[in-house]
């Protein structure tokens, strides 16, 4: 006899975050071995600025010129890896965006909050095990919550803003 009720949803119990990034459609897997933070930022900013190369950036093609331009203009060296200091420097460079980094697919763990009052948000997912960044294309879809509050970034049942 089959077990269950026939639902074919993606279950996250026991799966690593890197595998969940591949399975979920609302998370864009960054396919870069190095400079994954800069890759994730370029992939996230491309649809906001209506960049025609967005789909090729998502697939990991044609992103190297944009990556080199970003690293040269900011002067950030990501060879040792991206951490809070580099995130803060990117936040200082991209003043029109608010950068959020989540540590898990649960809304409770926010690693970095840009604290900028911008309406344009960059949502990233950080995998602590592989030390890799991924792009969250849709926060409510990635977090499997009905709504994500815009102020406190926690999951809630209705589309309200908490204090």
Image: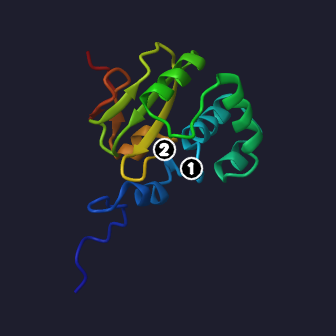
Q: Between residues 100 and 47, which one lies in front from this camera angle?
A: 100
Q: Earlier in the sequence, mark 1 or mark 2?
A: 1
Secondary structure of the residue carrying tag 1 is loop
Q: Residue furthest bottom?
A: 1
Work out whether 24 lies above or below 139.
Answer: below
Instruction: Assess disc 2: are there few (<14), some (14-19) or many (≥20) residues with their C-alpha within 10 Å of its C-alpha.
Output: many
Q: Do the residues bearing badges 1 and 2 touch, measured as CB atoms within 8 Å?
A: yes
User: Which residue is the site of mark 1?
Assistant: 30
For image coordinates 69% across by 46% down, the residue present is 57
Residue in the foreground of this view, choosing between 147 and 11: 11
Q: Is residue 87 above or below residue 135?
A: above
**Quadrant of the frame with the C terminus:** top left
**Res 19 → quadrant:** bottom left
> In the image, what residue occupies the spot 73% across and 52% down?
61
Residue at position x 42%, y 42% in the image: 126
Residue lying furthest top: 117
Position of the N terminus, as image quadrant, is bottom left
Q: Residue at x 55, y 24 (%)?
A: 90
- The residue that disc 2 covers is 133
21 left or right of 93? Answer: left
Colouring: rainbow
In the structure shown, which secondary structural element does the residue marked by tag 2 occupy? Answer: strand
- Image spot of residue 106 (x, y percent): 30, 43
Q: Would residue 110 appear left or right of 134 to someone viewing this image?
A: left
């Amino acid at each position: 006899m089959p077990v269950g009720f026939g639902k074919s949803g993606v279950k996250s119990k026991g799966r690593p975050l890197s595998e969940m990034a591949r399975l979920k459609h609302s998370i864009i897997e960054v396919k870069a071995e190095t400079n994954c933070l800069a890759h994730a930022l370029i992939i996230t900013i491309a649809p906001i600025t209506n960049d025609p190369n967005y789909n090729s950036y998502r697939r990991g093609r044609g992103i190297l010129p944009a990556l080199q331009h970003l690293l040269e203009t900011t002067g950030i060296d990501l060879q040792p890896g991206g951490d809070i200091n580099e995130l803060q420097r990117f936040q200082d460079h991209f003043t029109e965006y608010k950068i959020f980094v989540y540590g898990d697919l649960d809304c409770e763990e926010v690693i970095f909050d840009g604290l900028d009052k911008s309406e344009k948000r960059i949502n990233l997912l950080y995998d602590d095990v592989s030390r890799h960044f991924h792009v969250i294309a849709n926060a409510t879809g990635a977090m499997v919550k009905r709504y994500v509050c815009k102020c406190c970034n926690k999951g809630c049942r209705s589309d309200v803003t908490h204090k």
